[in-house]
Amino acid sequence: MRILRSSVLLVLVAVGFSACKRQPPQPNQGPVEIYNPVEGAVGIDVIPAGSTDDSATWIASYSDAGLSTKFGIELMPSPFTDENVAAGKGRFVAKEESEALPLLQALAPVLKAKHIPSKIERAQAVPFDFTVVRQKQTRFPDGSYNGTPPGNWALMQVSLAGGKAEFFLSINPRAYKAEFSMKDAADGDAILAALAKVF
């Protein structure tokens, strides 16, 4: 009987140890940060829509004047489940019952775009490459980021069309917020033209 109990105990310990090894790193469990809108950035809401060790998906939305822009964000691999992720690929995915104009109008001045697309060729998804700029960042009321104290924001540089159009995308999965901001003013029109296909 003692041998049997010892064997069972060893199995349970081994299983528990294995589970601990497989568990991905979790976001910092500090206070949930309140998002403060600032000039030069557009905040959007994000709701988790599934994640694995290799990817993360959110449903994003932006509302204004009773209209809502909705789209999906996919990251592969996810910088929130693997702290060693430095770069990866992703997609902005079209959703039904979405109005493109609210978010396009909000993004145009932030990205320094001169034109809002009027003739839009709808697409199911727009692929992109991303590079992680910073992780575990805290966002301050003025819109700046810092790693002290540690926070839940990940800042990424997103490249569309093979690097011909780039901008910054920041995501905080614990606060259910994300943020668009400009990298290069010359890319504004190209970014809006691409994003309009899935907005």
Image (cartoon, rainbow, N blue to C red):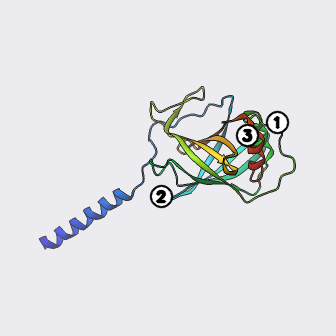
The spot of residue 163 in percent (x, y) is: 66, 47
Mark 2 — residue? 53
Checking the image for residue 114, the label placed there is 1
Which residue is more in the foreground, 48 or 41?
A: 41
The spot of residue 173 in percent (x, y) is: 54, 45
Give residue 41's quadrant in the image.
top right
Pointer 1 and pointer 3: residues touching (CB < 8 Å)?
A: no
Q: Residue at x 83, y 52 (%)?
A: 120
Which residue is more in the foreground, 160 or 59?
A: 160
Q: Mark 2: give few (<14), some (14-19) or many (20+) Cα within 10 Å.
A: some
Q: Residue furthest left?
A: 2
Give residue 107's quadrant in the image.
top right
Above or below residue 147? Residue 198 is below
The spot of residue 34 in percent (x, y) is: 57, 34
Nearer to us of marks 3 and 2 is 3
Checking the image for residue 162, the label placed there is none
Q: Residue at x 47, y 33 (%)?
A: 147
Q: Residue furthest right?
A: 119
Mark 3 — residue? 187
Q: Mark 1: give few (<14), some (14-19) or many (20+) Cα within 10 Å.
A: few
Give residue 90's quadrant in the image.
bottom right
Residue 148 vs residue 117: left or right? left
Q: Earlier in the sequence, mark 1 or mark 3?
A: 1
Q: Residue furthest top?
A: 142
Above or below residue 30? Residue 97 is below
Q: Earlier in the sequence, mark 3 or mark 2?
A: 2
